[in-house]
Image: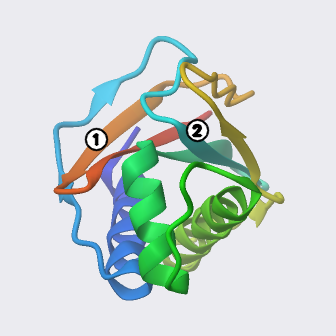
Amino acid sequence: MKADFVNPFISGLLNVMSTMAQTTLTPGKPQRKQSDVAKGDVSGLIGMVGPEVKGSMSITFDEQLALTIMERMVGERPGKIDAEVGDMVGEITNMICGSAKRELGEKGYEFGMATPIVVSGKSHSISHQVDGPKIILPFMCDEGHAHLEICFDK
């Protein structure tokens, strides 16, 4: 997977987190992901399909980071991951993908976005449903970790 294809998702995540949740994430080293087990407690997953490309993206948050983001976005901190936190993660997933879609569209990659799905729980799985390499990118901040996964058939 080419960096010019991955970078719009990274910049989308960093921008959404800083503008919407006043949270600065520090990127770690990207790796190939071999399993479907998530590296956090709540994940948003979105599919993308276009004439030349098919793929999916997920963002997973540690519980404490998800609760902190919720607090920063709406002013209230839930005690645990609930339906409202799930809705927020789905919306963040949509915003990240939408940002990447705009940037990739300028490079000639057109695709439509599905409605995000949200999965939560310890050791939940993320099924990308695409034949292609899965790249996982860790992000850190004082409140916890986030993991961005990108999988495309290109």
Q: Amino acid at mark 1?
A: Pro
Along the viewing direction, whichever of 64 and 140 lies nearer the viewer: 64
Q: Is residue 13 left or right of residue 56?
A: left
Quarter location, residue 111:
bottom right
x and y percentages locating residue 123 in the rendered image: 55, 19
* Residue 13 higher or lower than 126, as above or below: below
Furthest-right residue in this view:
115
* Residue 4 higher or lower than 98, as above or below: above
Along the viewing direction, whichever of 19 and 67 lies nearer the viewer: 67
Viewer-nearest of labels 2 and 1? 1
Residue 138: give its label. Answer: 1
Q: Is residue 117 left or right of residue 58?
A: right
Instruction: Please name the residue shown 39% across and 65% down the image.
Output: 68
Between the C-alphas of marks 2 and 1, the distance is 18 Å
x and y percentages locating residue 87 in the rendered image: 72, 64
Quarter location, residue 147:
top left
Disc 2: which residue: 152
Instruction: Please name the residue shown 62% across and 23% down the image.
Output: 124
User: Callout 2: helix, strand or loop?
Assistant: strand
Would you say the residues marked 2 and 1 are in contact, meaning their CB atoms lie under 8 Å apart? no
Along the viewing direction, whichever of 88 and 150 lies nearer the viewer: 88
Instruction: Please name the residue shown 57% across and 45% down the image.
Output: 58
Quarter location, residue 132:
top right
* Circle nearer the N terminus (2, 1): 1
x and y percentages locating residue 63 in the rendered image: 45, 45
Q: Is residue 33 left or right of residue 87?
A: left
Q: Amino acid at mark 2?
A: Phe
